Amino acid sequence: SRPRRSGADHLSTRAPTPDPDKRRSYLDAVLTRSTTFHETMTDAAPSSPSQPDRTPYADHTADPLTVLQDEIDALSARITKQGALVRTLKKSSASDASAIAEAVDALKALKLEGEELRKKQDELDPSKKFDRKGFDELVVRRMYVVPSFEIHGGVKGLFDLGPPGCALKAAIIDMWRKHFVLAESMLEMECTCLTPEAVLKTSGHVDRFTDLMVKDPEGGECFRADKLLEDAIDALLESSPDMPAEERDDHLRVQRQADAYGPAEIDELLKKYGCVAPSGKAYSDAFPFNLMFRTSIGPEGTAV
């Protein structure tokens, strides 16, 4: 009789360990034959202009609306960046008029391109046309936002988040954390809502984060002086289509720098272009309005 072999011996006999060099040679041969076959088929395939190039990474089933929305989103980012550049140039005393004009023209071109893309979007799907009035009514009716202190008359610009609004905010923060904290390994911080004046003074907000306002002496309503000037120049240009090109350029130059003038300069320009208040009287002198809220810290009120 023959002695019984152990399971380990039996397995080693039935399935011997392959030679690594032979395995590597076999794999190289398979890959070589596969590559040669692919190249032969590619060279032999007829090239037809009617058949698109179907690369492994090309998405040939993308929805036209989705592609168009991606283009609109990318263009919106460019508009925001160009708008920031224009504001920086206008605030800088070292910028010349030609550089400002070039930046403003580029911004206008981007905005026109954005309008054209949105028109295409409306044509592809009219149901996607944004109804701003209906949207505002919907978010209030569904309590996404609620006017703050409404039973006491409320205050313009102040809103509270309703239950759906709170849930939406929590979902956005959760998504933000998943991307920046978990995926990007960043560290989260939560800072105070109050910022000392010295910090904002250093950043330039105290000096530059202001708008020049004018007031209707009869009704007391306030208006942004630069917007009044821009609208007045637009009305003048529209009413004078035969205006000489040189004179038109002078008006456009004033319009481009509307938010860079000082109080005395803009007062003179408002009078020059015949801007009057809704009551029919001349506007008050321009005065700066800082867009931040001033508050005092501590019982002495010396820290702001």
Image (tube, rainbow, N blue to C red):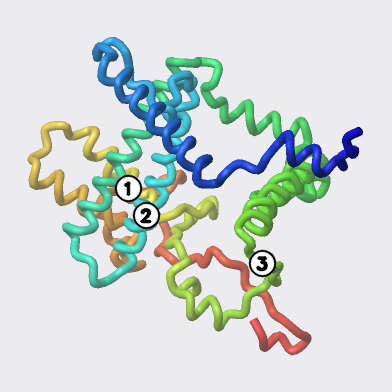
Q: Residues within 10 Å of mark 1 (few under 14, many from 20)?
A: many
32 versus 153 height, above or below: above
Judging by the rendered image, the residue that carries numbered circle 2 is 226
Query: The disc labelled 3 sits on which kind of residue?
Result: Leu
Q: Earlier in the sequence, mark 1 or mark 3?
A: 3
Give the mark nearer the N terminus: 2 vs 3.
3
Q: Nearer the viewer, residue 35 or 207?
A: 35
Report helix, strand or loop for mark 2: helix
Q: Is residue 92 left or right of residue 30?
A: left
Where in the figure is residue 245, as x and y percent of width and height?
9, 41
Q: Nearer the viewer, residue 235 or 207?
A: 207
Which of the 4 quarters of the picture holds residue 94? bottom left
Please provide percent x and percent y for residue 46.
25, 12
Q: CA distance from mark 1 to mark 3?
A: 44 Å
In terms of image quadrants, where is residue 298? Answer: bottom right
Evaluate if marks 1 and 3 touch, with contact meaning CB atoms under 8 Å apart: no
Q: Which residue is mark 3?
A: 187
Q: Nearer the viewer, mark 2 or mark 3?
A: 3
SS for dot 3:
loop
Picture quarter with the C terminus: bottom right
Q: Position of residue 290 (x, y in %)?
A: 52, 67
Q: Secondary structure at mark 1?
A: helix
